[in-house]
Amino acid sequence: MTAVLLRRRPDPVPFDADVGALLHKLACAEARSNFWAFRKLTHPDMMTGWWVKEVAAHLMDFYTDYINGLRPRLILTAPPQHGKSYMVSDFLAWVAGRDPDITIVFTSYADSLGVRTNLALQRIMTQPPYDTIFPFTRVMRGVEDTGAWQRNTEIIEFIGQRGSFRNTTVHGQITGHGLDIGVIDDPIKGRKEAHSQLQRDTVWEWLTDDFFSRFSANAGFLLIMTRWHVDDPVTRFVDKFPHTRVLRYPAIADTDEVHRLRGQALFPEHKPLDFLLERKQLMTAAGFASEYQGAPFIAGGSLFPIAKIKLVEQMDRHMIVSSVRYWDKAATEGGGAYTAGVLMHKLSDNTYIVEDIRHGQWSALEREQRIEQTAQADAAIYQGRYEIWVEQEPGSGGKESAELTVRRLAGHRVYADRVTGAQGSKEIRAEPFAAQVQGGNVKVLSADWNLGYFDELEEFPSGKRKDRVDASSGAFNKLALPASTYNIAALA
């Protein structure tokens, strides 16, 4: 019988407290040099997502540019309740820890927002993890008064250092206070103030004359805001400084991105897509685009009130009664002229939906190729219910251009719409479509071309371009008006 030798398993090595202390020390060292590591260590229960980590990297780049004397300028737009203000509070605490001689001024439209940031900063900087990470940056923990600890909610001074954090409001006094990093978190209160030219001008004058005049030679500027209006501080600042880094994070992706596809939520771990779609359904198109998408457009137009257009995520093709793709072709190549092709449907409930818009500044050959490719794609879906109309401009040039398009689209139901003086101006031709918009009978399928289209509708007829509106009006008139009113050109 062969003896079997059993080897005794060694006793487990007891955990050495010194090992734990060493690991914590290494984690603190990493947090000292890396902002994202700092956030994770100081907020172990923090909800994370790709976008939170990405913004942390951008903020670190901002600080690196600052210490290298590059005068960084960074603008961040993101939807509400996604944690952007808390990111900035953490960032300022991290910056102060690395450089307690730095002077930071924070401003917003309301004093309460500045106080909130002030207190958040003090909470971070008086906790044990912070003391370990940055042992040389200390703040007053409060003043004892009648048995209670009270905090200074206007200024935080770093003990034994030259640096400080001061919070104020837009139009608040900052005279005598230089700054190394200037932070503005929402300088405009909301849509009502943003749509006041006087308010926008007043805020901008304060920024240029008071706030920016306090910057040190290498100061950095950080702006976080909701974009309520196209003529806001973001637009004006980027116009003055085109190389400003602008980070726009829409709540719902309007195009495919590195980390998500079109239609996906920004921070689904915190605000899932169904929540965002509920907000979108409740809000006007202008409100959601501004507050959640960071892409404002002019709202409140008299002819085309955008707030009455309903954005839909998908359409029921079984409700389609008839379909028209109407092309408004550029009269000449170049010179700022654009071609627009609008696909519109009449639905069984007597409403209308704009499904697709093709829009671009193309050469004559490329334009005709795009029109032909679009016709083939449309006809494959809608077939017998689908017509193509091409606006024929007055004169022999307009007739020849329309003839060319009709010949290339042989096999499709295609017609030329001859525009005559009797039909009136573009504004007159747009009135029937505008009436349906005003009555709330027009829908638009959600897509990345929406914002440019809405801008043109709202600015019509005084805006720079009218091609998409003109094509929409043409499509609507062919769908809604009796066939006897069609002005089909004889293209013999």
Image: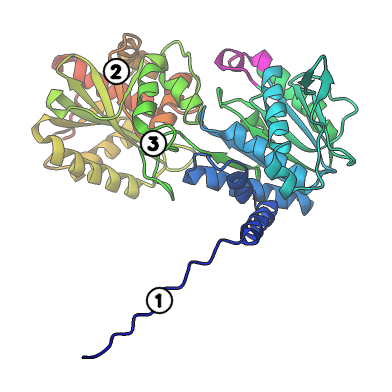
Above or below for 116 versus 377: above
Q: What's the amino acid at mark 1?
A: Arg
Residue 442 — which label? 2
Where on the picture, by quarter, is residue 379? top left
Regarding mark 1 in the picture, which secondary structure is present there?
loop
Q: Secondary structure at mark 2?
A: strand
- Residue extent of the magenta highlight: 188-199
User: What is the three-letter code of the residue carrying label 3?
Assistant: Asp
Residue 81 visible from this viewpoint: yes
Q: Which residue is mark 3?
A: 448
Which-is-in-front pick, marks 1 and 3?
1
Sequence order check, earlier mark of 2 and 1: 1
Assign a secondary structure to mark 3.
loop
In this view, which residue lies farthest toward the front?
A: 1
Q: Residues within 10 Å of mark 1 (few under 14, many from 20)?
A: few
Q: Is residue 174 magenta?
A: no
Q: Nearer the viewer, residue 432 or 238?
A: 238
Left or right of residue 328: residue 224 = right
Residue lying at 46% horizontally and 43% vertically, measured from the top left: 334
The answer to whether marks 2 and 3 mark residues whose Cβ atoms lie closer than 8 Å is no
Residue under pointer 1: 8
Q: Amino acid at mark 2?
A: Val
